[in-house]
Image (spheres, rainbow, N blue to C red):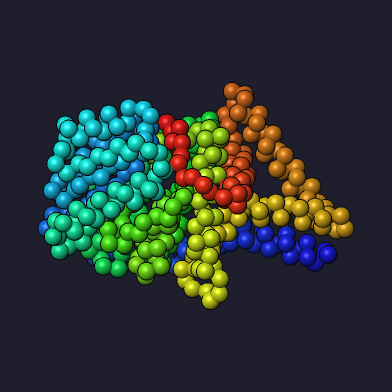
Amino acid sequence: MQIFAQMIFWGSILALGHTYVLYPLWMRWLARNKGPNPDRYAADDAGLPTVYVLMSLYNEEKVIVQKLESLYAQRYPADKLKWYVGSDCSSDRTAELVAGFQRTYAPEHFHFHDFRTRQGKPPVINALARLALEDWAASGQTGGAVFLLTDASVMLEPETLYRLVRHFRNPKIGVVDAHMRSAGLRSEGISQSEDQYLNGEVRLKHWESLAWGMMIGPFGGCYALRAELFEPVPPHSLVDDFWLVFRVLEKGFMAINDLEAVCHEGATHEVADEYRRKKRIAAGSFQNLARFKSWVLPPVSRLGFAFFSHKVLRWFGGFFLLAAYLSLAGLALGNHFYRWLFCLLTMGVATVLVLNYVQNRLPLRPLRLIKHLNYFLVMNLALTDGFFKWLRGIRENTWQRTQRY
């Protein structure tokens, strides 16, 4: 029994250590001395592909005008930029604001569809992609086309679109992800902890791009995809971006990250908002794990190993934490070393929770380490909660927008 408990404890610690420490360090080592994709379009290249912007909206009246203006300001040939925007039965002024922008700025290449039945983001994206592909086929163009999939809350810098699209001169590249940065960070709330995690993900995806050309999942808020590689997202999907990019990787194309293609998204500050978002993403992640489970089964492949190391182990992080704690409790009954370790771990977790509670309610300078550790615990709880949400069955894929600042 003691041996079994030790296997569970140390196996859980190894799984967490591998996904958060060992795998990133290995990717960093493999990426050393490797440069980004050299086969790129120049900014004035006549061969730059036509870009179709695909964007699904739901109650985005606070940000949609700024978003559309950031897209309109892109330094990209205007005759090669087309817009396909859909409102998913918004109940605010989103449709009105988009229609006004369409009339004023881009009536010729701007296609707006105000869906009157709520259906969720993936069905809207599927419908917009189908219309864009029909437009592309009817145009008789011989060159390729690119989809830019982006969220209303993500603001692009003027060169972002070109810096994403320039890589598609390389026929092996199927997806290019942007460099997401947080805006509106505050000392209170969880925004700094979320930004810390986001920065770590940016680095890891960049190293994966350099080392193997297979970034495991984009950030979703802004990425470019070869139009001919688009596949309709399955019904009731919660995380469409992971599905689309992993299908590209399955076909043997590369998915990379460009650190120079910068965009910005407002930070979340409330734990409840981020918990709800993480829970929903986690449910969609387990949904995708069920679809792509063959990649984590023998025989082991490079793509399967990266998927398992970067994503699958993290999705089960809450279970590993719980398994480690419970097995340690059992080991503490008959071993002084494990008893001390159990006491230290229990006191450590309790200290983090208490101090985080206190510093959130007193006008004190918050301790970042405490906030980061509390964030790690809460977000792993959200991942576990998302697993049970998936297990109960996902019957709809509509969403509520996350409050950002």
Can residue 221 be seen here? The reply is no
Q: Residue furthest top?
A: 363
Q: Residue furthest bottom?
A: 299
Q: Residue at x 71, y 43 (%)?
A: 348
Q: Exactly how many numbered labels are in the figure?
A: 0
Q: Nearer the viewer, residue 374 or 236?
A: 236
Q: Nearer the viewer, residue 97 or 208?
A: 97
Q: Nearer the viewer, residue 7 or 24?
A: 7
- Residue 78 position, x and y percent, is 14, 46
- Residue 350 position, x and y percent, is 72, 39
Q: Nearer the viewer, residue 109 or 382?
A: 109
Q: Is residue 199 above or below residue 73?
A: below
Q: Residue at x 46, y 50 (%)?
A: 236
Q: Residue furthest front?
A: 117
Q: Residue at x 73, y 62 (%)?
A: 8
The answer to whether 333 appears left or right of 298 in the picture is right
Can residue 273 be seen here? The reply is yes
> Which quarter shows the N terminus?
bottom right
Q: Is residue 161 above or below residue 86?
A: below
> Which quarter shows the C terminus?
top left
Q: Residue at x 85, y 58 (%)?
A: 335
Q: Quadrant of residue 142?
A: bottom left
Q: Quadrant of residue 205?
A: bottom left
- Residue 100 position, x and y percent, is 22, 30
- Residue 121 position, x and y percent, is 39, 45
Q: Residue furthest right?
A: 334
The answer to whether 385 appears left or right of 1 in the picture is left
